[in-house]
Image (spheres, rainbow, N blue to C red):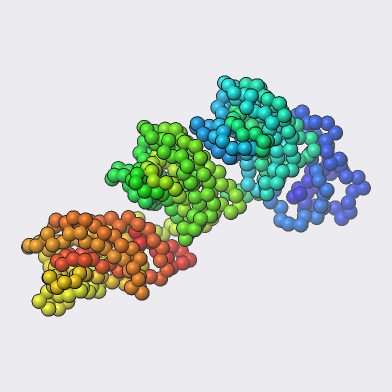
């Protein structure tokens, strides 16, 4: 609809050269014969022609009319995937690799997305059955073409069975253009659906004029998780580019893992590489979620079957609405969550900040206003001695007063907090500092996070805060239950354009 090459009229008609009158004879709407090779001009599918464009063209010109297997550059998805029979295997050009659904649903389906923002003239669809066994399961199925709204625009039905390594070709002879191709069992069939290849032969008639290049966006970005199994299984291991390292959560919780893409981004698809050494089956019934800047759910995809050791599972998003700041993987059950790598493909919707400095630990608390519950022997202003930069001076509250003693520092602004280091008094009585709790408050003195600790600290100990929160114009403060302490806060400032928001972690 954006550009026409109509040779029957004896000219090339571009949308900028629309004639002032319509020709007396329109070309045929359907080919007179089923195409068997590159269609001639008379076989190019057409609809009723609008000679004056009604919107700006989005089609790159000219578009080649040479049929190819469009599925090879598409994205495949399925109603379910089991036994490592991932949907992308039906468009890998190898008829010996197969998809395999989970066999427990009526109307199982496979679908190929030929491209966001595209329309494609389809000559034929070829279904190649699996080679090794069980070909008889491919029976009573529909072959369909769908538009961008996933409305069926062309359909064919096959009643009988298809043998091992057999093909079925479905000619599309009505000039249909489509974005999606789908094969599905009839709704009356509850059985496994598995094939070797789904080929879609044709050519694009409409494509985005200036598509954004698809890039990998997760590697090296900041990742967080609900927990880590040990110090070698932190969240960042799943975005370090090394499939031999893994993130591993604790196993007695409903775990989650999350990567921050830096800015709002369009997400085409997410690929998860499972751990290689063992226990791959745990990555079943996981949910892959797109979250916006406020961690609200945008879209989700479900991993139904188990994923083998070292296998890669792909979840396709690729909708106009597939825009997110974070990608999250989670369980709705108590189990271990472990993954080698998570790759997120798409493009950023805005430029990533380039002025953010490399994080350098700095003492945010130094010289800031400090208060405490009481002062030993009424010595004035000793609360500030915990933030004076001198480890030989210390603050001291009253002892044995029958109420919990506390100390507080006002950070006077919003910051990203990476860790807290506490220096104990050095001359005596260091054992009094144990089982302390850190509290974080906003500017209205409302508690926003509690971080308990256990045991003593010796002469000095650092505590990783390890959580992420979003605040609007809030001033976090730190309150620490203690009797004799020295407190140092290390921080990294995170600047985010166009909003007053920072992360406390």
Q: Nearer the viewer, residue 128 or 256?
A: 256
Residue toward you, 456 or 409: 456
State left or right for residue 420 relative to residue 21.
left
**Residue 360 appears at what percent x and percent y?**
30, 57
- On the image, the x and y values in percent for residue 40 come to 80, 34
The residue nearer to you, when weighing 39 against 113, is 113
Q: For residue 391, which quarter of the picture?
A: bottom left
Q: Is 289 left, or right, of 334 in this rendering?
A: right
The answer to whether any part of residue 186 appears in the image is: yes
Q: Give residue 393's quadrant in the image.
A: bottom left
Q: Which residue sits at x=44%, y=48%?
A: 332
* Residue at horizontal 43 percent and vertical 57 percent from the top: 354
Which residue is found at the position 25% from the left and 74% from the top? 369
Count of numbered badges drawn on the protein: 0
Q: Nearer the viewer, residue 188 or 306?
A: 188
Measuring 20% from the left and 69% from the top, which residue is drawn there? 404
Q: Residue 240: in sight, yes or no?
A: no
The C terminus lies in which quarter of the figure?
bottom left
**Residue 383 percent across, percent down from the top left:** 18, 72
Q: Residue furthest left?
A: 427
């Amino acid at each position: 609809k954006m550009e026409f090459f109509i040779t029957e009229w004896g000219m090339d008609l571009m949308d900028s050269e629309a004639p002032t009158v319509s020709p007396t004879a329109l070309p045929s709407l359907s080919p007179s014969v089923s195409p068997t090779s590159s269609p001639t001009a008379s076989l190019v599918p057409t609809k009723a022609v609008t000679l004056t464009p009604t919107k700006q063209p989005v089609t790159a010109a000219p578009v080649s009319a040479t049929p190819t297997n469009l599925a090879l550059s598409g994205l495949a998805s399925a109603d379910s995937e089991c036994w490592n029979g991932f949907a992308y295997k039906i468009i890998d050009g190898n008829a010996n690799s197969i998809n395999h659904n989970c066999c427990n649903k009526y109307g199982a389906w496979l679908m190929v997305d030929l491209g966001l923002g595209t329309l494609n003239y389809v000559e034929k669809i070829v279904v190649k059955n699996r080679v090794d066994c069980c070909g008889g399961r491919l029976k009573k199925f529909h072959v369909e073409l769908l538009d961008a709204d996933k409305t069926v625009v062309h359909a064919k039905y096959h009643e009988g069975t298809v043998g091992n390594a057999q093909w079925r070709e479905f000619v599309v002879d009505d000039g249909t253009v489509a974005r999606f191709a789908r094969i599905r069992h009839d709704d009356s069939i509850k059985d496994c659906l598995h094939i070797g290849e789904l080929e879609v032969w044709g050519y694009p008639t409409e494509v985005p004029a200036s598509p954004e290049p698809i890039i990998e966006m997760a590697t090296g970005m900041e990742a967080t998780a609900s927990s880590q199994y040990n110090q070698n299984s932190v969240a960042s291991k799943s975005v370090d580019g090394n499939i031999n390292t893994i993130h591993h959560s604790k196993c007695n919780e409903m775990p989650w893992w999350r990567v921050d893409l830096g800015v709002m981004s369009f997400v085409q698809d997410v690929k998860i590489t499972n751990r290689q050494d063992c226990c791959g089956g745990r990555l079943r019934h996981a949910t892959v979620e797109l979250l916006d800047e406020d961690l609200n759910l945008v879209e989700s995809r479900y991993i139904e079957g188990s994923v083998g050791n070292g296998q890669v599972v792909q979840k396709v998003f690729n909708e106009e609405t597939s825009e997110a700041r974070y990608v999250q993987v989670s369980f709705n059950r108590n189990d271990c969550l472990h993954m080698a790598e998570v790759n997120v493909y798409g493009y950023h919707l805005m430029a990533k900040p380039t002025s953010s400095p490399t994080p350098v630990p700095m003492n945010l608390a130094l010289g800031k206003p400090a208060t405490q519950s009481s002062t030993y022997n009424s010595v004035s202003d000793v609360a500030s001695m915990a933030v004076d930069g001198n480890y030989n001076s210390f603050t001291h509250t009253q002892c044995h007063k029958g109420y919990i003693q506390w100390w507080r520092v006002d950070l006077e602004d919003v910051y990203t907090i990476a860790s807290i280091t506490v220096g104990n008094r050095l001359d005596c009585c260091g054992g009094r500092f144990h089982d302390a709790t850190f509290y974080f408050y906003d500017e209205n003195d409302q508690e926003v996070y509690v971080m308990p600790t256990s045991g003593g600290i010796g002469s000095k100990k650092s505590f990783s805060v390890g959580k992420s929160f979003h605040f609007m114009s809030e001033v976090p403060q730190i309150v620490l239950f203690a009797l004799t302490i020295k407190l140092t806060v290390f921080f990294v400032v995170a600047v985010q354009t166009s909003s007053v928001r920072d992360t406390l972690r």
